[in-house]
Image: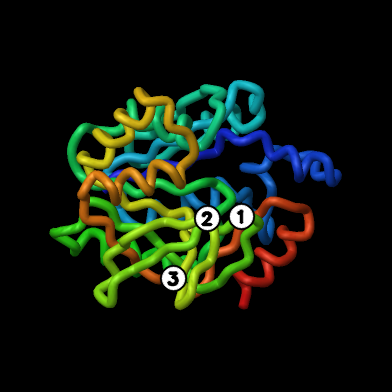
Amino acid sequence: MHYAIIAAGEGSRLRQEGVALPKPLVRLNGVPMIRRLIDIFMQCSPSSLSVIVNEQMTEVQDYLRSLTLPVPFNIVVKSTPSSMHSFWEVSRVLPPDGKFILTTVDTIFRTDDFLAYARAFEADDSADAFMAVTPFIDDEKPLYVSVTPDMDITGFHDAPFPGVRYISGGIYGLTPPCLRVLGECIGEGVSRMRNYQRRLVSSGLTVRAWAIPKIVDVDHQSDIATAEAFINS
């Protein structure tokens, strides 16, 4: 399986709050966030690893180029208007077949929870997409997820609804048919990852959910200590 990281955001809120480092290099327990993700992915015996960073993040580019990994390591440098467009750019270096897992650099989860998710996706022979969801709602603009009793996703929603249990966790397990839908979205001017996820469902693909107890994001300076405490708990 292949792995990819979107690390192309500007991290403007962190910078405004006095955090000098680019977001991917912000340290959690002394380890840059992007390195923590890479280390976790390497525990999954990846076939390749790809990362996209924006053109202004020269410090992040230099850091990534200094790494030596035992698998093909693709670094895409491109400034994009949204995470979906970043996904489109990094998808162009992904092999055309096989499964892959994509996440954003500031998505924080426990290692064991992610490894269980990756194993479940590897073992699932029927899902076109395998999305991590979480019942822990601590996001500024959560994307709510409706599921069947068998955890098939029936919709993505901007607002909560009766009986809602999960929100999107920002971890995307995908297959080649999902890249076809991504190309359609880019061609039609669709923006935002949440609209892409909606299109996966409306296209008739099998989109399945896997629950992870807790996932947090690092968007503000205060989130750094919260994420460290979560990882250590």
Q: Quadrant of residue 171?
A: bottom left
Residue 125 lies left or right of residue 48; in this view the side is left
Question: Tags 1 and 2 in contact by the CB under 8 Å rule?
Answer: yes
Local packing at callout 1 (Cα closer than 10 Å; few below 14, some 14-19, many 20+) is: few
Local packing at callout 3 (Cα closer than 10 Å; few below 14, some 14-19, many 20+) is: some
Q: Secondary structure at mark 1?
A: loop
Residue 158, label in figure? 2
Q: Is residue 167 above or below residue 135?
A: above
Q: Residue furthest left?
A: 125
Amino acid carrying mark 2 in the image: Asp
Residue denoted by label 1? 141
Amino acid carrying mark 1 in the image: Lys
Residue denoted by label 3? 212
Q: CA distance from mark 1 to mark 2?
A: 8 Å
Q: Mark 3 vs mark 2: give the one in front.
A: 2
Question: Tags 3 and 2 in contact by the CB under 8 Å rule?
Answer: no
Q: Residue at x 55, y 38 (%)?
A: 7
Local packing at callout 2 (Cα closer than 10 Å; few below 14, some 14-19, many 20+) is: few
Amino acid carrying mark 3 in the image: Ile
Q: Residue at x 38, y 47 (%)?
A: 197
Locate residue 183, reporting x and y percent: 31, 29
Q: Quadrant of residue 115?
A: bottom left
Q: CA distance from mark 3 to mark 2?
A: 20 Å
